[in-house]
Image (cartoon, rainbow, N blue to C red):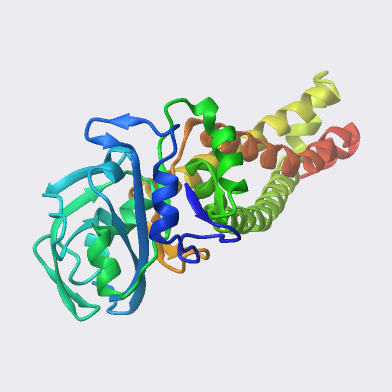
Amino acid sequence: MVLRAGSETEVQSAIDRTQAGIIAAQPEIAMGTSGRLVASEAIVLINLPKRVTGKPANVMIRGVQMPASLEMRREVKLARGRWFRPGSNELVAGIQVAQRFQGAGLGETLRFAMRTWRIVGILDAGNTGFSSEMWGDVEQLLQAFRRTAFSSVILRLRDPQEFARLQARLEADPRLPVQVKREVDFYEAQSRRLADFIRLLGMVLTAIFGLGAVLGAMVTMYAQVGARIGEIGTLRALGFPRRDILLAFLVESVLLGLAGWALGLAPASLLNFYTLSTVNWSSFAELTFRFALTPGIILKSLAFGVGMGLVGGLLPALKAARLPVLEALRAP
């Protein structure tokens, strides 16, 4: 991706036609089925009401050059309808936009920039941000919004090893005040703030509820020890060593943690089927995403649940193991 130097997002970037032409003429660009794999794109934001609440939110429209833009993004597929015709006031809406916003469904129309735009297709890009965008002809969008510059230029290289050479040449060209990034690095930087916020929020909530779970396990096990003092005395009188008493209560506490883990995992797994939305702090457009419950997360949560049960049951187990035999036998 090529953006204006100093721009953090495509919304902030501006590349004029002369600069876009210079970038498109670079010899490292690969050839596709329909020509050179390079496309100049533009980003605009419009305000649409949501279907459920009616509250307005920003939606990103990406002006693309077909078929190069599509050929370079293999994750983008047409789910329903057809692709827009170049030179027309037609749009293809991302599946998340079509479901959540009024006027963005297949066959519906939108009115903005003094034009009427028809939705002729629905695109599905999986869990990528493109599912939260609308695509249209870049020239028509520039004319409608009275703009003369593109937002970015995307291209594919013949050989990925040529990236460093292309980057150095373009960024050193005095005619091109631009920055060159790999697309994956660009979108990782775009999502970093939101990802860090979600991660920090998750850690805080985990710490709070984890502490509550440990205290709950501790109270429960102290109650169990108090109710079974006589049994503990009998076991000690029969010759069971302290470590066996300690181990027995620790195992019981771990099983309590396992039960809590299973009860928590069941509703948490339902998040796989629920789509959440938030504002992308970089582009100020609404972004939808889902939580994915992976085997790694399941194993980590299992270890956390077992650990909480173990920590919560340690002090009560030590108390049970240290009870004097005679005192335990005298208990009612």
Q: Position of residue 328 (x, y in %)?
A: 84, 38
Residue at horizontal 12%, vertical 54%? 85
Picture coordinates of residue 176 (x, y %)? 54, 54
Question: Which residue shows up at 38% across the image and 59% down it?
Answer: 17
Left or right of 117 on screen, residue 237: right
Of the pair 104 and 265, the residue shown nearer to us: 104
User: Quick check: 11 left or right of 68?
Assistant: right
Image location (x, y in percent) of residue 300: 59, 35
Name the residue nearer the viewer: 82 or 173.
173
State whether residue 108 is above or below residue 332: below
Quadrant of the rendered structure where residue 287 is?
bottom left
Front residue of this view, candidates 290 and 146: 146
Q: Considering only vertical position in the picture, is 211 above or below 69?
A: below
Tell me if residue 15 can be seen: yes
Say how many tags the image has: 0
Quarter of the image where one finds residue 314: top right
Left or right of residue 164: residue 14: left
Q: Which residue sits at x=78%, y=42%? A: 316
